[in-house]
Amino acid sequence: MKDQATQLLRSINMSVTDSRRQILDLFLENKGGALKHADIEKRLDNLDRVTIYRTLIAFTEKGVIHSIPGSDGSAKYALCHGHCTDGHHHDNHVHFQCKACGSTQCLDDVMIPPVKLPPGFFSERIEMVITGFCDQCSPRLTEIAEKRYKVSPENN
Ligand SMILES: [Zn+2]
Ligand SMILES: [Zn+2]
Ligand SMILES: [Zn+2]
């Protein structure tokens, strides 16, 4: 358990640098939740944007994290589980974005259903992001709905 980040970096033959370790630590602490570039920048203010940007790209290429399209146009990133390797991702799970708390999560057990394409089309990547209310927020749904839809419809 101790220094999981270092072990993970070694296991994929990436040299262990301070910035890589710190960024990976954030993802490991944030189990299942996705992080935006801006979140990482805020939490690790000792690192500059370019370092974070490059590290995220390197991690994505190495199969450590995968990107999730965000509704506001900015990508989020989450840890890959299990079988992703260098250049080959197998993250065919659904992502869920909560409208109440703003979190984006990997639903690892929910697979994207197979999509039949017309002849001549070959898919390379398929994304599915479901928006709604997460398990933490849905019990408070009535309260949230009142606040959100009655008082400030312009937030939507
Ligand atoms: Zn992956
Ligand atoms: Zn939520
Ligand atoms: Zn995911």
Image (cartoon, rainbow, N blue to C red):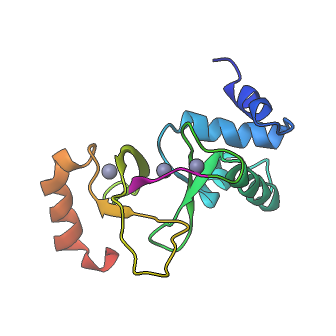
Residue 50 horizontal/vertical position (percent): 81, 61
Q: Is residue 74 visible?
A: yes
Residue 84 horizontal/vertical position (percent): 61, 44
In the rendered view, does 31 fall on the left or right side of 107? right
Residue lying at the far top in this picture: please name it: 2
Residue 30 horizontal/vertical position (percent): 53, 39
In the rendered view, does 138 fall on the left or right side of 115? left
Q: Residue at x 48, y 45 (%)?
A: 33
Task: Name the one closer to the observer, 13 or 28.
Answer: 13
Stretch in magenta: 89-95
In the rendered view, does 63 fall on the left or right side of 12? left
Q: Residue at x 26, y 55 (%)?
A: 133
In the rendered view, does 107 fall on the left or right side of 85? left
Q: Is residue 93 magenta?
A: yes
Q: Quarter-wise, where is residue 115 in the image?
A: bottom left
Residue 141 horizontal/vertical position (percent): 17, 54
Q: Is residue 81 magenta?
A: no
Rendered-image quadrant of the C terminus: bottom left
Task: Name the one closer to the observer, 81 or 144.
Answer: 81
Q: Residue at x 26, y 44 (%)?
A: 135
Rendered position, 56 above or below 121: above
Q: Residue at x 71, y 31 (%)?
A: 8
Rendered-image quadrant of the N terminus: top right
Task: Name the one closer to the observer, 97 or 41.
Answer: 97
